[in-house]
Image (spheres, rainbow, N blue to C red):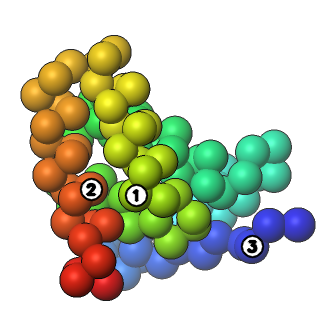
Amino acid sequence: MQEKIKQTAGRDQLGDFAPTFARLNDDVLFGQVWNEEAIDVKAKCIVTVVALMASGITDSSLTYHLQNAKAHGVSKEEIAAIITHATMYVGWPKGWAVFRLAKQVWDENNK
C-alpha cells in the first residue's frame, strides 16, 4: 500500500471564500484521486507535470508539482527526459518555461 496523500491547501487558502472548491480540492482530488492505487504516486506526479505543461500552466502550482515529483523519486535525469519528450508534443516555448522551473527545483544548492 502506498503512502496516503493528504492535502489541506484548499481549505487553508480558499476555505472561507470558496468552501465547496476547497473541499473538492482537498477531499476529492487529493483525498481520493491521488490516493487511487491503480498507479503509483511517482507516475501521478509525472502525469500531473506533463498535464500542467501541456496546458501552459507555469505558475506556483507547477512548481509545487515539480517539487512533489522530486519528493516522490523523480530524478533530475528523469525530469529532463520527461520534459524533453513532452516538449515534442506540447511545444518548444512550454518546454523552455518548464525547464526553467525544473532547474530551480532540482538545483542541488536549493534543497
Q: Assess whether mark 1 and mark 2 are in contact (beta carbons under 8 angstroms).
A: no
In the picture, measured across the screen, residue 72 lies left or right of residue 54, that is right
Q: Is residue 1 above or below residue 99?
A: below
Report whether residue 23 is seen: no
User: Within 10 Å of the Cα at label 2, are there few (<14), some (14-19), or many (20+) other Cα atoms?
Assistant: many
Which dot, 2 or 1, sits closer to the camera?
1
Return the residue at label 1.
76
Tell me which amino acid carries mark 1: Lys
Question: Regarding mark 1 in the picture, which secondary structure is present there?
Answer: helix
Report whether residue 111 is seen: yes
Tell me which amino acid carries mark 2: Ala
Q: Is residue 103 above or below residue 86?
A: below
Residue at 31% x, 84% y: name it.
Answer: 111
Alpha carbons under labels 3 and 1: distance apart: 22 Å
Residue situated in front as seen by the camera: 77 or 15: 77
Alpha carbons under labels 3 and 2: distance apart: 24 Å
Return the residue at label 2.
102
User: Within 10 Å of the Cα at label 1, are there few (<14), some (14-19), or many (20+) other Cα atoms?
Assistant: some
Image coords of residue 30 (percent x, y): 58, 61
Image coords of residue 110 (percent x, y): 23, 81
Marked residue nearer the N-terminal end (3 or 2): 3
Return the residue at label 3.
3
Residue at 62% x, 46% y: name it.
Answer: 43
Marked residue nearer the N-terminal end (2 or 1): 1
Which dot, 3 or 1, sits closer to the camera?
1
Tell me which amino acid carries mark 3: Glu
User: Within 10 Å of the Cα at label 3, are there few (<14), some (14-19), or many (20+) other Cα atoms?
Assistant: few
